[in-house]
Image: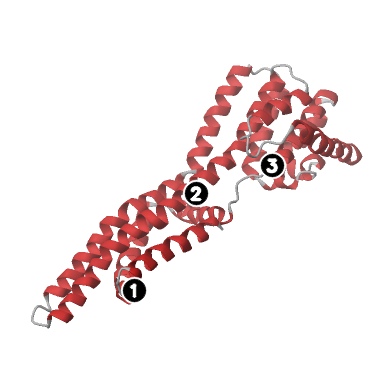
Amino acid sequence: MTIIIGLVVTLACMLGGFAAMGGHIEVIWQPFEYIIILGASLGTFIVANPVKVIKDVGVAFKEAATNAAPKKADYLEVLGCLFVLMRELKTKSRSEVEAHIDSPGESAIFQAFPKVLANEKLVTFITDYMRLILMGSARTHEIEALMDEEIQTLRGDKLKAYHAVVAVSEGLPALGIVAAVLGVIKAMGALDQSPEVLGHLIGAALVGTFAGIFFSYAVFSPIATQIKIVREKKMRKFIVVKQTLLALMNGAMPQIAVEHGRKAISSSERPSVDELEQQTLATGAAGAESAKQAA
């Protein structure tokens, strides 16, 4: 929503200011200039990126437009799921815990936290390191280094869409010049025409330079920044899992371990201690009860 509001404000101020100083807005409407600029940008974007990244850019645009960053409730659900798993680890046999780790889709614990279960990469991250904890032979600093490496890899994958959009943004001013040059070439072929016609053609050519710069700095660059912000926030869930499980490995009780995870959340989305107790732990208790009944 903020993207739409921002674009409306930008267009209103730009076109309103241009009209206020006596400009004719209809002169800016040069559809073929826009086709050259945006079409060339789309073509270079397709050339530069694999199909997987191209598809992910569409997903990233949707996430940025809807501000699909994790909210407080999402973090509470992650902490609740971790709390139940850690409590099972402390109170149940290895085989009982492994049943949840090996088949999370069929686990009553994961089913009690649908948002967590829907995030395949997050579930894999949780189950992989819970499995290593179950083995009991790995050292904490080794697990931490492994987690950091995986998080960095996941972050790189998530930001490929951001880098792809940034590359488009950086190329647009140059493509605007290309469109302008083509317009000037067209104008040079009409030197025998009246000054009024020639002036119109030159003005249309200059729209290409304007459009390239406008699309770059007022449209694609801000959208790319929003994509990066949302994707970075989505990666915060993995940091929460990391801090929680490391605390558990260092001997913390589940109630204390989730507090380590809570502290890894940005202050603007971080649930309070009371919310952690009232919602996360209460939900965790319900999840544990469901798992018990399923067993």
Identify the amino acid type marked 2. Gln
Q: Which mark is residue 72?
A: 3
Quadrant position of the C terminus in the picture: top right
SS state under label 3: helix
Marks 2 and 1: in contact by CB < 8 Å? no
Nearest the viewer among 124 and 172 is 172
Real-space CA distance between mark 3 and mark 2, rounded to the nearest whole angstrom: 19 Å
> With respect to residue 216, does 153 lie above or below?
above
* Quadrant in the rendering for residue 144: top right
Q: Which residue is mark 2?
A: 226
* Quadrant in the rendering for residue 27: bottom left
Q: Residue at x 74, y 47 (%)?
A: 114
Real-space CA distance between mark 1 and mark 3, rounded to the nearest whole angstrom: 45 Å
Q: Which mark is residue 25?
A: 1
Marks 3 and 1: in contact by CB < 8 Å? no
Q: Which mark is residue 78?
A: none
In the rendered structure, which disc, 1 or 3, sits on the residue that comes first in sequence? Answer: 1
